[in-house]
Amino acid sequence: MNHEMVLNVVGCHKGFEFQGPRYRYLGDNSGEEFLEEFLLPWIGSIPEGATATVDFSGTKVFMPSFLDEAFGGAVRRGYGKAVSSLRFKGVDVETLRDLKQYISNALAEDSSSLQSS
């Protein structure tokens, strides 16, 4: 039996309808805040074998620095396998392509740092 876990981005805390900057000190609704307060705890709660979907429905503004810090940041903190298996919905094709590129870049950085150690 395959269980589906969904993280609704807009439903988190005060909402991330309008994504903010990369870091908390730069302003509200930052990628760093989303990563630490919502994304990592949610990833940690996903049962083995479950399908995990991040739902961006209702998000009005997609900020590249927010997406890179949240999803690339999760990879850089050791969650590469989990982030690579995430599904995304409620996001336009161009933003989805960019999001997957941020994840891919972080995975490449992660693997090159492992090779150089």
Image (cartoon, grey):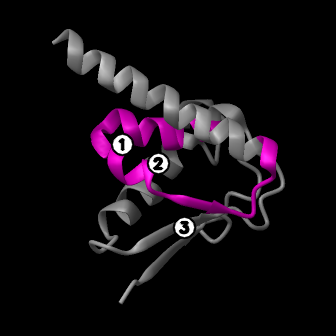
The quadrant the N terminus occupies is bottom left
Which one is in front, 88 or 7?
Answer: 88
> How far, Cα to Cα, is label 2 from label 1?
13 Å
Q: Which residues are magenta?
A: 66-94
For the stretch drawn in magenta, the main secondary structure is helix
Quick check: is 92 in the magenta stretch? yes
Q: Looking at the picture, how far across and down is residue 32, in whole percent?
A: 50, 40
Task: Determine which residue is flagged by label 2.
Answer: 35
63 up-or-down from 5: above or below: above
Within 10 angstroms of label 3, few (less than 14), some, or many (20 or more) residues? Answer: some
Q: Residue sitting at 69 percent across and 33 percent down?
A: 64
Seen from the viewer's position, the closer of residues 93 and 29 is: 93
Which amino acid does the dot numbered 3 rest on? Thr
Q: CA distance from mark 3 to mark 2?
A: 15 Å
The outermost residue toward the front is 1
Q: Residue at x 48, y 36 (%)?
A: 72
The reply to whether residue 22 is in sight is no
> SS at mark 3?
strand
Residue 26 is situated, as x and y percent measured from the top left of the image, at 62, 30
Is 89 left or right of 59, judged from the image as shown?
left
Amino acid of disc 1:
Gly
Q: Residue at horizontal 38%, vertical 75%?
A: 50
Instruction: Characterize the local packing of mark 1: few (<14), some (14-19) or many (20 or more) Cα atoms within 10 angstroms.
Output: many
> Which residue sits at x=32%, y=70%?
45
Q: Look at the image and tell me in which quarter the C terminus lies.
A: top left
- Three-letter residue code for mark 2: Leu
Report the residue marked by disc 1.
80
Q: Which residue is identified by label 3?
A: 53
Q: Dot 2 lies on which element? A: helix
Does the magenta run of residues contain 69?
A: yes
